[in-house]
Image: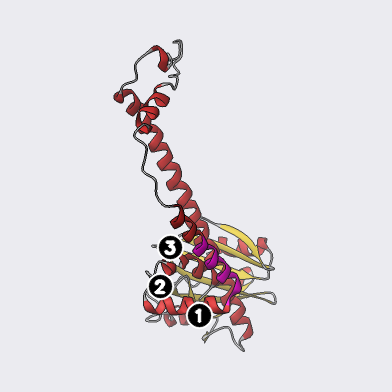
Amino acid sequence: MHCERVRELLSPYLDEALPAQDHSLLAAHLEACQGCARVAADLRHLARTLTAVGRHRTPPSLLPRLRRVLADVPLPAAGRPARPPAWRRTATPAAALRWAVPMLAACAVTAIATWWLFDLSQAEARFEHDVLAAHMRALLQETATQVVSADTHSVKPWFNGRVDFSPSVSDLSAQGFVLLGARLDYIGDRRVGVLVYRHRHHSIDVFVWPTAGSKHRGDRVVVVKGYTLATWARQGLTYWAISDLGADELETLARLF
């Protein structure tokens, strides 16, 4: 289990809300990984601190104070004076609600947007980690392919029954990207297809899976630990390519798909 996935599951783990198998895997990871163990210890300490503080009831005076503050907010309007302050008028519940509702709605939208962006960035970081790890594993093997062929009509049917989608397999040899074959791998908790290309003497792994249900932030190129990763989406499929090539060359490959 990767550290990123472990840290996502720490809260339900500490709450004893994980299935038994996941709980055991995560516990074993915490015994072996000092970094994740420290994060878990910090979360336990925070939980104990919050428990010790306890809960406090909302004071009855809070709502009248909130109404007075909201009623004191000036109402901008072109060509008209600002709304008089609270000491010159009587605040009513309707006036307070008229200001409170849009303010609360704005806060909710901001919170949801922040959560969405954070969740998206976390998912992208996990994909980067998984793609890099899978590429490194392939480089350590005698062969990076399970089916060896430069013929797209041989590679594409090979995926039938092995994945639940139909990858697009392109012959890009005229553009300098020679198809070597394909294999299966595991990215983001699902089985994916991998197309293996060679450009000059550089190996390129192109991971592909359906876009539906996955989080994709748009076409981009990043460098992680000396390797260039490019991601893009085409016709319902998400692609992640990785190589020690430069960003320009992977961007060229992306445009060819």
Q: Is residue 14 above or below residue 74?
A: below
- Figure quadrant of residue 222: bottom right
Residue 59 placed where, x, y %? 37, 37
Disc number placed over residue 166 in the picture, else none: 2
Contact flag, marks 1 and 3 (Cβ < 8 Å): no
In magenta stretch: residue 35 = yes
Q: CA distance from mark 1 to mark 3?
A: 28 Å
Separation of residues labelled 2 and 3 (CA atoms): 16 Å
Residue at the image position 59 percent from the left and 72 percent from the top: 132
Q: Position of residue 203 (x, y in %)?
A: 64, 76
Q: Is residue 195 left or right of residue 56?
A: right
Percent across and percent down for residue 8 are 48, 65
Total labels drawn: 3
Q: Earlier in the sequence, mark 1 or mark 3?
A: 1
Mark 3: which secondary structure? Answer: loop
User: Which residue is under mark 3?
Assistant: 214
- Under mark 2, the amino acid is Ser
Instruction: Tell me if I can see residue 43 in this picture.
Output: yes
Three-letter code, disc 1:
Ala
Write down the residue under mark 1: 28
* First in sequence: mark 2 vs mark 3: 2
Residue at the image position 49 percent from the left and 64 percent from the top: 44
